[in-house]
Structures are given as C-alpha cells and as structure tokens.
Image (cartoon, helix red, strand yellow):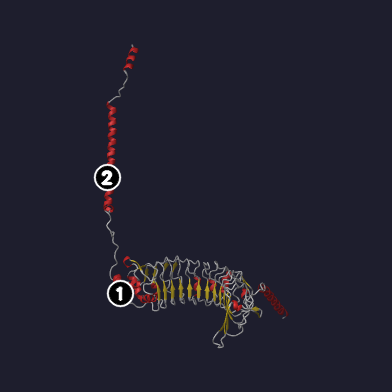
Amino acid sequence: MTRLCNRNNNSKIWLLLLALIANGHTLKDTEFEPVEGICDTCTCTVRNESNAQYLSYSILDCSTKNLRHMLASWPDVFDNEQANQEIVFSLSGNDIKSLQQLPATEADLVFSCRHCNLTEMASGAFLDTPNIIRLDLSWNLLTGDALRPDVFRGKYAEQEYESIALDELDLSYNAVDFLDAALFEHMIHLRRLSLAHNPLKKLTDGTVTALGSISRLEHLDLSYAQLDDLPGEMFQKIEGLRELLVQGNQFTVVPSSIRLLKPTLMALYVGENPIQRLDEESFFDLDHLTQLNISGMPLLDDVDTGTFSGLKSLEVLSCSNNPKLVEFDMSDLKGLIRLRQLDISHCAIEHLRLDEPIPVQDETSDIAFIETFPKLRSVKLEGNPWHCDCELYEIIESIKHILEDDDEFQGPHHSSEARCETPYDLSALPLTELAGKSLCSTPPKKVPKIPIYEAPAFLRPRSIVLSLLSVVVVLLIGLIIGVIIVCIKRKLKENDFRFASPVRYTTVRNSTTSTILQA
C-alpha cells in the first residue's frame, strides 16, 4: 500500500514538473494587448437573448488593426459566463507571430488568426477556452515542430489533461511537412480538419498515426499536399469519414485505400491529379458516394465502361476541364437513378456513347423514349468539339428539356452554349436545335473524291505526267545524239592515222649545204 501511494505521489510530481516545463512556453511572452478601449480600435457587437431557444453572441473583430499580441482579457461588455453564449473573435491580418494563451471564457468560442505570420504557439494556448469549437490558423508559417500536442491540451484534472471541444481545425496554407503522432490526443471531438496546401509529400509514420487517431473525423482535406500515396493504416480507425478531398496531388491512380471508407464516404474530390485512366476498379463499390469530382486532369484520356456503374447513390458528377478526354460513355450513367447534376464541359469530347440508342418512330413523330435520368436537373456540355450525328441527337433528345431549361435560365444563345463543331454543314449549330430528320433519316454525306474547284491546266495530273515524259524523251534523244557524235569522231580519227604518213618540211639552204658537205 505504501509503495502504491509513493508511486502515485511520484507520478503526480512528474506530471507537475511536465506542466511547469510546458508552462514555460506560456510564460515566455507576458506582453498582452491592453483591453481598455479595445472596442474603439476593434468592432464589438453584443447580442443577449433572454429567450433560451435563441443564441446569445458577442463578436470581437480585430482584423488588420496592427496588433502584435493577444488581448489580456475580454471587453467588459462581454458576458463570458452566460449559458448559451458564443464568442466570435478574429485577429486575422495582424503581425502576431507567436500565439499566446487566449483569455479565459466558458462560452463557445470561434477564433480566427489567418494571415498573422504565426511561427510558434504557446503551450496551453487554449487552456482557458475549453469550449473552443472552431479554430482557423490558415495562411501562416506554422511547421510540424510548432504543432505540439501540449498546445491543444485542456485543463489538468485527475492525473491527466482534459480535452478541448474543438470541432473544426483549419491549418491550410502553412509549412507543415509532418505531424506529431500524438497531436490530436486532446482533440477527441474533432470532426473537420484541413491540411490543404501544406508540403506533406510522403506521409511519415507519425503523420499516418496522428490522422488515423481522429476517430470522429467526418471531413478531411489533403488537397494540394504533394502526396503520391494514401496508406491504408490512416483510415482503419476512422469510423465516419464522409468527405475526402485529395485533388491537386501526384496520384497516378485512385488510391486503393479509399475503398476502406466505403461504409460512410459520401463526397470524393480526386481531380487535378496526373491520372491517365479510370476503370471499374477506381471507385469500386463506393455505393454511398453522392458527389464525385474528377475534373482538371491534364492526362485523363480514357474512362472505361463500368467506371461509374457501381456508384448507385451518385447525385453529382463533375468531369470537366479534362483536355485529353475524347469520348464519354453515357451507358454507365443509366443505372444512376439519383443523378441530379452532370458536368462534362470543356473537355475534348466529340462523341457520347450509348449502348441502347433510343428508337426513332418515323420521320414526322417525336422520339419515343423512357426517361433514363429521372432526377437529372443540370447538364453542362459546352466547350467540347461535338460531332453531331444520329447517336448524339438521340441522347440530346433524352435530356433536351434540361438543356432548354439551362438556356432559359442563362438567356438565349449564351456564349457557353454547347454547339456542333463537325460536320461542316452543322458547325456552330446549338445541340438543342439538331433535327432528327436530317441526321437519322438520310445516309451520311460522303466526302467528295474530287476537289471543289477546277485546277489550272498545268497542275492537272495528266498534264504533269505528259510534261515529265516529254522531259525524259528529250533527255534520251540528246543522250543518243551525243553518243553517236562521239563514236563518229573516234572512227574518223582512226582512219586518218592508217592511210597518211607525216610530211617533214625543211629550207632550201639547209638542203644545199648538206649536199656540198657530203661531196
């Protein structure tokens, strides 16, 4: 028994020492902004409701007021102890750099410190604000070293620190490259977390452990974090994640670990990744998914049949701004009876495929069709080089009422209206003005084999061939004549040497002299 008491006393002493060491960060900077006259510098708004069903609130907006430190206390007009009270406090746009401990209050607190050049945070910064529910620290200079578990601890009670009531934490646009494995141990109520636009790159084991420990997380934003993989361990303990944002990373395929979120995931944003191909394995069995964004993929050129067939609950599909996507299969969407919005605008789509085209009755009657998309209310097709043929016409007819509603809302012939690009005789014609009689009842026009203008005589094929033959004949005749002349010259030269001998000439004087000498 004595040993047990000694052990408890020792543990209390160690916890007390740790608390004092941690408080060293809190006491490091004791300078605070005076609260006297703060409502003259900042904007103070107070609303006290006597009716319990209405929320009383106080607003203290100190944005861009050239402040350097935290306020020493709340203004006197604030009632910090009243039940059903909320305080909205903003220090955004001030050069704070080091975040000190917030003034004490039991009210629900919403605190914003964006664009404050924060590089460090005091230990126990939210120690006296246990009911802080939303915290915005985006657009600062915070690193993984600045985000310590002790920063977010609550009050000390019964040999441990209590948790704070934080529901939403925004750390986007900082310099966080890793997370402490125990970072969220005092934020057990956290439901929404944003780490967008941080250089996380390869997720460290500590980061994976930290994210995987937030069991109540419902919204996770990891967009533009330079990631190329999502380890499955990160999702094994998360029980209710509904929204996952991972757009703008370096994924070449949709991470397979996302399948672990099948029971709860309702919104997935995976656009702006260098993914080239989507197939039936990409979103396999995510039958609770209601929103899917696959827009802005610069390399996406293939969406296989069956890619969307398993998304039975899908309501919103955004597949816009994919410059290499040439075809889109509408057959995959036929079973999505809950689909409300479809956006395939500003791609390179020329054709819409549909396995079972809607039949045409005759040349004069309307197209008879069973409404394939009963809840579809918005379709965006503009910005594509459409090739207008009978198959496209049949698909457009099945959603024509939706396109016409959009045209009526945006005005007639608005600039973003979907239009034909080919064939030439239908170029620039709005898709809603396609006529089935001309597209489906007559055979397609063949491209003429002859040019549409008469070429000059010297450029006609026959004239060119005759000219070439004439040149060849002239060259051959010249060559033959040349050979004959050379042969004749050689023959004449040979005859001259055979029948004549060379004649020697001399002067008379030389001949007489030589005769006398001989005598």
Image position, residue 170 (x, y; %): 55, 74
Nearer to us in this view, 446 or 240: 446
**Extreme residue in the top direction:** 519
Image position, residue 399 (x, y; %): 36, 75
Nearer to us in this view, 344 or 382: 382
Query: What amino acid type should be assigned to the residue bearing mark 2?
Result: Val
Query: What amino acid type should be assigned to the residue bearing mark 1?
Result: Val
Residue 356 appears in view: no
Q: Quadrant of residue 143?
A: bottom right
Q: Earlier in the sequence, mark 2 or mark 1?
A: 1
The quadrant of the picture occupied by the N terminus is bottom right
Q: CA distance from mark 2 to mark 1?
A: 64 Å
Image position, residue 232 (x, y; %): 53, 71
Left or right of 302 in this view: 456: left
Q: Which residue is mark 1?
A: 360
Q: Which residue is mark 2?
A: 473
Residue 448 appears in view: yes
Image position, residue 342 (x, y; %): 41, 74
Nearer to us in this view, 178 or 452: 452
